[in-house]
Amino acid sequence: MGTSRWVGCCASALTLALAQAAAAQSAGPTAAAPSAVRDDTGVIEEIVVTGTLVRGIAPVGTNVQGFDAADIEVMGVTATHDFLSRIPVISNKFNTVPATLPGIGASVQRPNIRNLGLAGGNTTLVLVDGHNVVGAGILLTSPDAGALPPGVLERVEIMADGGSSLYGADAVGGIINFITRKDFDGVEVTGHFGVADPGYEAGDLNLTAGTSWNRGSGLFSVSRRESSNLSASDRDYPRQDLRPEGGDDFRQTTCNQANVIVDGVPHAYPDLVPGTLNRCDLAVFDDIMPEEDQTSVFGSLTHELTDRITLETTAYWSDRETRVADAQLTAADVMIPITNPFFVPVAGQPAQTVSFSFAPVLGPRSYSRSEVEQYGITPVLTFQLDNAWQVELLVNYGRSKTRTHSPLINQTALTAAAAGTTPETALNPYDLTQTNPAVIEAIADFENFGRNTQTLEDYRIVADGPIAAAPGGDVLVALGAEYQRQTSDALSVFNERGNLDGAILQKANRYLASAFGQIVVPLVGAGNGLPFMDALTMDASVRYDDYSDFGDTTNPKIGITWDITETLSLRGNWGTSFNAPSLADTTGAVDTRASILPFSPFRAPDSPITDLFRPTVILAGGNPDLKPQTADTWSAGLDWSPAFAAGLTAGITYWDVKLEDTITVAPPGFPTSLFTVPAFQQFALVNPSLAEAQALTAGMFIDGAPSIEALFAVASPYAIIDARRKNIGTLFVSGLDFYGDYVRPTGFGTVFVSLNGTYLLERDSQPFSGAPKEDLLDNNASRLAISATIGASWRNFRGSATMNYSAGYDVVGAGDQDDTGAFSPVNLALTYEFDGSSAWNEGLSLTLNVDNVFDEEVPFLNAAPGSGVPVNGSTIGRFVNLGLRKQF
């Protein structure tokens, strides 16, 4: 995407705008509103609130953060997942611009409240208007948090508490609920264009039109978003050679100039001096941010069929294409015999291994790409009954299609070319430009292609209303039932582009029947208030889920809110939640396979050295025997609005999560623990028989041998190691969430301050019952994340500065570095709303956002890019973004 394209786009829409009236702008996130409000006519207007199915009340015993459209707009974000990355409790993405990376293991945006882990399904439930969303991805069935553009959102609510008692699976760390716009009259055109110099551009353009009539309303919105790639070559970091900063040299030896190894001694080509190596920094060719295009369409239609029956239908469609660059494909330790016509003799030996890059013939970069297309439609029929009860019937259908292409080397063609005996068939590893182009094409025309089509059918009925009058108010009840069907049709293949021979194809489905209920009892209220007890409300809920593939589960929750005075409230809750293992991790997994290693690097301590030369069978991928992850969650907190400081609100919450049967791949201490810890010995079968191997690999794709029987005919394996996803251990996480907001009118306008953050107190792992806990806070985990804003409004202007602070932390895997520093970029947001004194500027507003205004660099980390050691912050740099909005 070029600058001229976006300049032309913006020039053709000079009247676009993005902002809101300065005086109406809130200082920051607020508690969620009650689920019913009265309009000017006194009629109750229903709106969604996360954490309750009962109308007319706020969630009991829990804190829900609410961000309205104005909060989102003032950030100037062009993608919904970028907005989520600025919220501290979504800790795995805070202060890092999230990038959608193509590949069968990624390709969708997957938020993770409390950072509870991403293996084997979701621990954060993503909803749209309070209902489930179809999953997307190849090895994922996660709803894509980036599917809806920010412009169609009325609110986003985040409940960082367990919620399975009302919503079922995945609501372990919490819930993110995207609530869409339903009612709009007129036409609105908005747009952004931003630049991070050098090398990065991003922007969007959105058109929304709506109208209302006597009994209803309709809205239609279309959005286009584009962002260029950001190459590491345009930034000082990441790099593999960290010696100038006092770190280590992680440069590679698979370079444009080859390295020849003879008898273990390296010889750098072309001089071939013994003991020399060609080294190269391949990280500079990687993309920090991918190139991405997204088109989204959203619509809603509401109509009162009768005085008591209303039909509301929402629908969306989204198509996102992503392209990301990596360093060009390389080959390491390729055996070149003397019979190769290009063979260069070294030390008089008849064979050698050579390491090199294909960049001289294929260019410095290779490109992966993905496409995620999805849509959903949700009609909801609401019946108002005579006794203040309401019945809601929901039908929800969604479908997604994900396709990914990841380039690879054809190892079979590479081996054959290395052993070629004529110039027409042989590989020249020393100077690839001298190799027959047909040979190069055969080696490079190879990829990992994946696709998955997923569907969701959801049918739900909920009835709610009062059942009795009490001195504290009406006792309210909600009762419901739900039926879901999920399907997955996935494929993965390693082959020439377009060739599906040998593909792994898995079709899977799941049926779910649920029943749930909630009761809210106002023990104390306006009719029986007591000193230091203005109100006392209890909420109890429970949900029963019966899965077709792994059985049933029942999850209760109890919450209580105690309003001590009008200005001080205490709240608390306890419940259980669960995460159902996804179809992509169980019967629908397309990465399930038995990989044959020709040797055995993982052995018992008493294994003789001769076992090293026996093969090992690694079982990898999904596991049909996975169980759900289950959690006990509780929290307690207070909210305070002191009378002596009008405009001040503050609160703090202690929270605790115990997640059992966590889904992971390798047990702690792998591989040694497989042979020394009794609890893990079940995952390594030493000296298996043919019958045992046949039973364990039945139905699996065999990678590295024609068959298990053929493997045994050549050599008996040392071991079969189960490295599939599995339930192991317990995770203990606790912490403090806190917030504060202060708004003060002045003689010139308003000043405001807000604070929102989370602090980790504990993050321990227990590998099995009775084992000592491991403190994970000493292992690449930042304890503290804070978002702090200060600002003011004056007439038509509004300005604010926000610091997003991530504390430094202890690092593991970064050489001799023990810790890394904090990252605290400052973002500026400026808004001007025109006064509407003439037709051209009526409904016109302008915003300017500067993210990371001081261009703060991320803290130094002595680790190679991609090593798995997390970077504390984003490397995008200063990003200047202009926004315009025009309403007609």
Image (cartoon, rainbow, N blue to C red):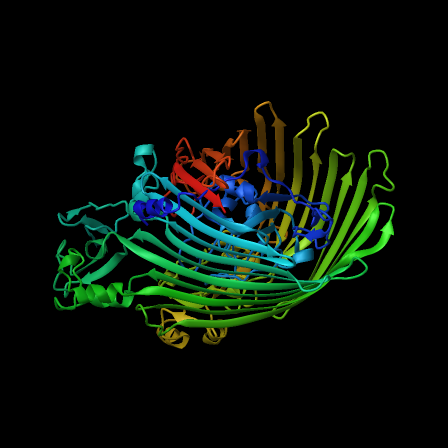
For the question of whether residue 616 can be seen, the reply is no
Residue 170 image-quadrant placement: bottom right
Residue 665 image offset from top left, x and y in percent: 50, 58
Q: In the rendered view, tell whether residue 835 sits above or below residue 480.
A: above
Residue 161 image offset from top left, x and y in percent: 65, 48
Residue shown at the point (16%, 50%) measured from the top left: 269
- As drawn, the residue found furthest toward the top would be 747
Residue 182 in the figure: left or right of residue 11: right
Residue 265 image offset from top left, x and y in percent: 22, 50
Q: In the rendered view, tell whether residue 68 sits above or below residue 182.
A: above
As rendered, which of 680 and 223 lies closer to the eye? 223
Residue 307 image offset from top left, x and y in percent: 72, 61
Residue shown at the point (43%, 68%) measured from the top left: 594
For the question of whether residue 848 can be seen, the reply is yes
Residue shown at the point (33%, 46%) measured from the top left: 8
As rendered, which of 440 and 280 lies closer to the eye? 440
As rendered, which of 64 and 635 lies closer to the eye? 64
Residue shown at the point (62%, 27%) measured from the top left: 744
